[in-house]
């Protein structure tokens, strides 16, 4: 009885590995680079229910204390605008912002969104994935 059970387990493991490889082929052999969105809370008040929408997906951070940041990694299929929604912990004020965009192209970026004490948002974007680009002054 031990021989057939071992064969069945080995067959099941091989079948699972084949299925996993079939379903995740492109992600395993051709991984895509991811953009990074960083949301900074500079309001002086804890933010609750922070929602970042980009590329048809919504990323959530339930609490973001004052002077803290939250990071989200994401992939987009097309050029997509950003949308932010948040609430303050101490009052019922709701903040909304939309603007900027994440490009699909081969270059990914770090997008830093800073929410200031007046409820405004400042967006800064910088390219990622170019190691040594900032060290070009070190080259003799």
Image (cartoon, rainbow, N blue to C red):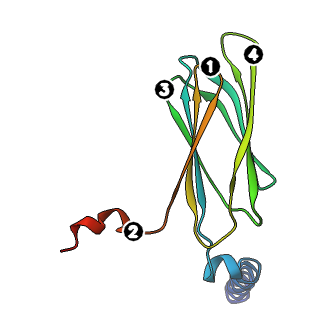
Estimate the x, y position of residue 119 in percent, counting from the top left. 65, 23
How far apart marks 3 and 4 lie (CA) works out to 19 Å
Determine which residue is flagged by label 1: 118
Near mark 3 (Cα within 10 A), the count class, few <14, some 14-19 or many ≥20, is: few
Q: Secondary structure at mark 2?
A: loop
Determine which residue is flagged by label 4: 93
Determine which residue is flagged by label 2: 131
Q: Outermost residue toward the left?
A: 140
Which quarter of the rendered picture does the N terminus lie within? bottom right
How far apart marks 3 and 2 lie (CA) works out to 28 Å
Q: Secondary structure at mark 1?
A: loop
Of residues 60 and 124, the one drawn nearer to the viewer in this rendering: 124
The residue at the point 61 percent across, 73 percent down is 106
Q: Earlier in the sequence, mark 2 or mark 1?
A: 1
Estimate the x, y position of residue 60 in percent, counting from the top left. 70, 39
Tell me which corner region of the image, top left, top right, bottom left or bottom right, holds residue 132. bottom left
Establish if 48 lies above or below 81. above
The residue at the point 73 percent across, 88 percent down is 4
Q: Earlier in the sequence, mark 3 or mark 2?
A: 3
Report the disc number at residue 67.
3
* For residue 112, side relative to residue 89 (left or right): left
The residue at the point 22 percent across, 73 percent down is 139
Q: Secondary structure at mark 4?
A: loop
Q: Earlier in the sequence, mark 4 or mark 1?
A: 4
């Amino acid at each position: 009885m031990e021989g057939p059970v071992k064969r069945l387990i080995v067959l099941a493991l091989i079948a699972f590995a084949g299925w996993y490889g079939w379903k995740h082929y492109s992600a395993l052999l051709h991984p895509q680079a991811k953009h990074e969105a960083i949301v900074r809370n500079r309001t002086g008040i804890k933010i609750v229910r922070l929602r970042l929408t980009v590329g048809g997906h919504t990323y959530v951070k339930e609490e973001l204390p004052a002077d803290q940041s939250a990071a989200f990694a994401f992939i987009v299929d097309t050029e997509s605008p950003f949308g932010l929604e948040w609430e303050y912990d101490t009052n019922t004020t709701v903040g909304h912002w939309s603007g900027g965009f994440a490009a699909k192209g081969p270059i990914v970026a770090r997008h830093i969104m800073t929410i200031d004490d007046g409820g405004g948002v400042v967006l800064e974007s910088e390219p990622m994935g170019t190691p040594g680009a900032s060290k070009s002054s070190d080259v003799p």
